[in-house]
Amino acid sequence: MAALAEALELGVDALQQAIGVLRAHAASRASGTPRAKDEALPDPAELPVGVADRLLLAIHEEALGRPLEVTLECDACGELTTLVLSQDAVGEHWPRSAWCAPGVGAREPSYLDLAAARGDAGALLERCSIGTGATLEDIGRIEGSLCGPLVSSCIECGDPIFDDRDVVPLVLASLAHIGAELDYQVHVLAATYGWDLASIETLPDARRRRLVDLAAGMAP
C-alpha cells in the first residue's frame, strides 16, 4: 500500500500514475524472488496496453480486496446497475499484431509508447510501426485496451445500458483512497504502540490491517 500510495502521489498525470503503480507492484513482487546480480527487472510499462490495463484491475483487487465496480443509470427507467470489472469479467487479452505486407506492420502500443508520444499520433505510429507503411488505423485495429463502451442490461427493466469508460482513470480514482487509508493506519498504530513511520509502512498490508482492527478494539 505504501508503494502504491507513493506512486500515485508522484505521477504528474494519469498515465504516469498508472506506470508508477505497475512498477511499484512489480517491485514488491520481485523483492521476495531470488534474482541474478545483474538481472534487470522487466518493466511492466512495456507490456501491451491490453495486458497492462488488465494488470491494473488485478492490482486494484489485490490492494483493496475487491474488484473494480462501475455503476450505470438506465435511461429508460432510471434504475442503477452495478457492473463488476474483474479480470475474469473483461476477458483474456489476446496478443495482436497487424501485418500489411511482408516485413511491414504494427504492434500493440505500451504505456511507455503512449507516454513518449505525448498525444502525438504520428509519434505513436513511428514507435509502433514495423517497417514502413503501417497506419494509425492498423494500430487502432489491434490495440486491446479496456477503453470504450460498457454494455449490459438494466437489472430492473432489461433495457440495454452502455457508457464509454476507460479502466485506467477508474482504477486510479479508486486507488486514490489508499493514501488516506494508509495515513489512518499509521496514525492508529503510532498512537497505540508508539511505532515509527518506517516500521509501520514495512509491515505486510494484511498484518497492518489486523493490527489496526486490534488497536481499534482496545480503544475505550
Image (cartoon, rainbow, N blue to C red):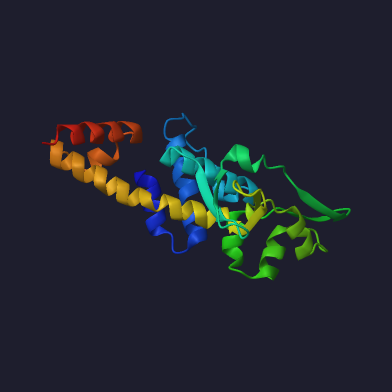
Is any part of residue 19 visible from this angle? Answer: no
Furthest-left residue in view?
220
Image check: 213 left or right of 131? Answer: left
Asked which quadrant contains residue 84, the reply is top right
Q: Is residue 136 above or below residue 190?
A: below
Residue 81 lies, in percent from the top left, at 56, 49
Residue closest to the eye, 75 or 203: 75
Residue 213 lies, in percent from the top left, at 25, 34
Q: Residue at x 58, y 55 (%)?
A: 111
Residue 58 lies, in percent from the top left, at 52, 40
Q: Residue at x 49, y 32 (%)?
A: 36
Q: The C terminus is located in which quarter?
A: top left
Is any part of residue 50 visible from this angle? Answer: yes
Q: Residue at x 42, y 40 (%)?
A: 63
Q: Is residue 122 above or below residue 152?
A: below
Image check: 159 left or right of 179? Answer: right
Asked which quadrant contains residue 91, the reply is top right
Image check: 140 left or right of 201? Answer: right
Residue 163 lies, in percent from the top left, at 62, 58
